[in-house]
Image: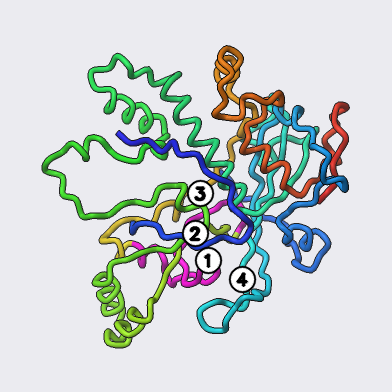
Amino acid sequence: MKFALATLAATVAVASAKKVPVASKDITPGAIKADSKLGMRVLSKARKLDENQNEEIEFTWVADYSIKFQGCHHISQWNDEADGEDEPFIQTKRLVRFRLCPTDSCSYENAGGCDSSYGDYIIDMNTFLAAYWEDKLNNCEVYQETVCNCENANNEEYCQYDCLVDNGMDYCVEENPYQANDENQQDDGYEEPQIEQMLECAQFDFDEDAYYNYQYNNNNNNANNRRKLEEEVQYFMGPYCSDQGGKIFMGVFTDEFCTNFVEDHDDFYYKMTGGHKLPYSSESLVDMECVSTKEYQEQDNDNNNNGNNDNDNADADEVKEAWEEVYANAGKCETQLNNQNVSPNENA
């Protein structure tokens, strides 16, 4: 049985194109103008650290806080690398706002997470998603070991699958063992993209015959579409911010920056993959739960016993490495932090 436990690397601000197999409450955000002071700083990868670049940032206090997703924004900016035909002159920069709330007061029901002693931050969407899902997939392993307890089950593979799916953690599973072991199950060759392949704008490979049939059924000229295909027509998949700014969905696009949507991309993906649903097209990639930044205590204890470090447990700050990177690179507004042990950082 395959489980999605791969560690994700934090992505750069402008998404690169990679090939992949074929495969709550909305919060209305305030607008950020690209030419504003905040917008200009965020567009430079949301990175404005201390004036002394050699000075280390203090992370210890972050371990007592949880991440609360606040919403996302789109900023349109000029694409200096556009060639006029294949690349758009205007590309979209996607940003995420999040809040650090004290873990003991962070609430799912509170749209802001907390009402006092918090810091507000902004960072590019790809970096946030990479950290969010690295953390979430690592939770899969912890959950299997501490909750599922399938070591003595008659069939450990089935036990783990049932445990994860029954508890709403189907994203942890790469393969359904019941289907994989069913000799009567027909394989149509479709491989659903794994989550780590969907966190940045990536090329979407498709079947040529499916493309011809899709265009033909939409009353498009088949000969013209065959010519387009010979000219290497490309499509891309990537995350985007919902209109109201409270959710992040997957979409299909015609450009490598995931700026221009394919018309009715849900239907396009369905027909191009032989009847499969576009992942996370209606379910948000990020929910409104409070996400602890603190390393797992059991892992900390193991580290103290043997000194091994596969998950940033060797350092003294107790903050998960993925969230360290997010905090370090985010634009910061810590006026409301009210933590006597922390000097507020206003490098927004």
Which of the marked residues, 2 or 1, is nearer the chain's N terminus?
2
User: Within 10 Å of the Cα at label 2, are there few (<14), some (14-19), or many (20+) other Cα atoms?
Assistant: many
Q: Which residue position holds label 2?
A: 238
Which of the marked residues, 3 or 2, is nearer the chain's N terminus?
2
Residue placed furthest toward the top: 305
Callout in the foreground (3, 1): 1
What is the CA distance from the residue labelled 2 to the residue labelled 1?
6 Å
Residue in the foreground of this view, choosing between 284 and 323: 323
Q: What kind of residue is marked 1?
A: Cys
Q: Quadrant where the N terminus lies?
A: top left
Q: Secondary structure at mark 4?
A: strand
Which of the marked residues, 3 or 1, is nearer the chain's N terminus?
1
Picture quadrant where residue 306 is located: top right
**Extent of the magenta region:** 244-269
Which of the marked residues, 3 or 4, is nearer the chain's N terminus?
4
Callout in the foreground (3, 2): 2
Q: Which residue position holds label 1?
A: 258
Q: Position of residue 128 (x, y in %)?
A: 61, 47
Q: Which residue position holds label 4?
A: 91
Q: Secondary structure at mark 1?
A: loop
What is the CA distance from the residue labelled 1 to the residue labelled 4?
8 Å
Which residue is located at x 58 percent, y 58 percent? 241
Callout in the foreground (3, 4): 4
Which of the marked residues, 4 or 2, is nearer the chain's N terminus?
4
